[in-house]
Amino acid sequence: MSEITKRRLRLGMVGGGEGAFIGEVHRFAARLDDHYELVAGALSSQHDKAERSAKALGMARSYVDFEAMAQQESEREDGIEVVSIVTPNHLHAPVAMAFLKKGIHVICDKPLTATLAEAKTLSQVAEESQAQFLLTHNYSAYPMVREARAMVKEGKLGNIRSIQVEYAQDWLTHSLEQTGNKQAVWRSDPAQAGLAGCVGDIGSHAYQLACFVANTQAKEVLADLSSWGEGRQLDDEANILLRFENGAKGHLWASQVAPGNENALTLRIYGDQAGIEWHQETPNELMYSVLGEPSQRLRRGNGYLSDAAASVSRIPSGHPEGYLEAFANLYCEFAEQLLTATTNPHLPTLATGLHGMRFIAASVYSSQNNGLWVPIGH
């Protein structure tokens, strides 16, 4: 990683109290490169839970109301400079707007919001704020994903024809939400998850990864969404055809009801000269196949890779890097951007999230209307 000003940014967090999954991931990521110090949080709306969680983390200031936190922290000389939002989807927009209005930078988990209307409102608020915004599509920060993007931009695949991405899990094969599982309950509840289930939760990751590496966006979609879980109101599987702005065509399959799959995110891109293939469960490898030649297995940490890959690679080749390091790469690059007044084109922004919400909304509308081709729009 590049050397940057050695000053810790004062970090706050909304959500992520005891029993939460993604909040702990964000805290690991913030600590890994020592660019942040977690000093305040509204870790829960329940007072006792918020206090216990803050005490366990050694946090200086604890709140139960995020609006009060935004107000009071903005008035302190030692108030937070950045806030991480790790709540269920329905709180992303109100929390982000509260802090942006106070000039506090925002790091937000995906998807951007629960609805497209919220995303548009949030975008307007962000335009009026001096604060910056990072959306944590962490898969875009793996070294070999950065390598794949560089290869596409350098023309090593030729003209892109086909973009295939899939994200398969099995943890919702049975109706786990009916057992009280916290993660399943909110993801299956339209009031908390928003207009989509699987498409918003993991389909948004798959779509952003495909667009990021291929350096393009889809212009229209044709979607067939399914809800296989008994009594489930939101989709748990999606099959989506994609037509991209660069002329390529593709398919996105996302499923949380595919037995035998844990976190099988896979991307394949084919041009008229070569193809690449990357698997999240073996993230340190990238397959590169030139037409008529033996396939090559490129590996993280080697000198033949691009600067884009090397800049987010931490340790020598042969040592595995993965999920937590990718999150940390985003946190580190965002800190560098804030402290040096530079712009990193690799970072997912609010605009990335707004387009992602347009993709989700178009997919839901297409499926509800018997598979119409629906434009994503801008």
Image (cartoon, helix red, strand yellow):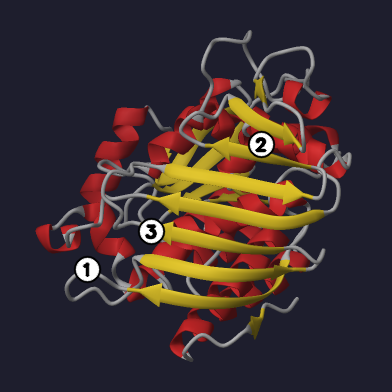
| In-image side of 215 versus 56 (left or right) | right
**Residue corresponding to mark 3:** 255
Quarter containing the N terminus:
top right
Tell me the amino acid under the disc marked 2: Val
Q: CA distance from mark 3 to mark 2?
A: 22 Å
Give the mark, 3 or 1, whose residue is nearer the N terminus. 1
**Residue corresponding to mark 1:** 229
Foreground pick, 169 / 270: 270
**Place of residue 88 in the rendered image (x, y in percent of width and height, measured from the top left):** 39, 59
Q: Please tell me which residue is depicted at 29% across the width and 58% down the height of the picture.
A: 257
Q: Tag 3's secondary structure?
A: strand
Category of crowding for the residue at label 3, using alpha-carbon neighbours closer than 10 angstroms: few (below 14), some (14–19), many (at least 20)? many
Q: Tag 2's secondary structure?
A: helix
- State yes or no: discs 1 and 2 in contact (Cβ < 8 Å): no
Residue 309: numbered disc:
none
**Residue corresponding to mark 2:** 145
Residue 104 appears in the picture as rendered? no
Tell me the amino acid under the disc marked 1: Gly
| In-image side of 199 versus 267 (left or right) | left
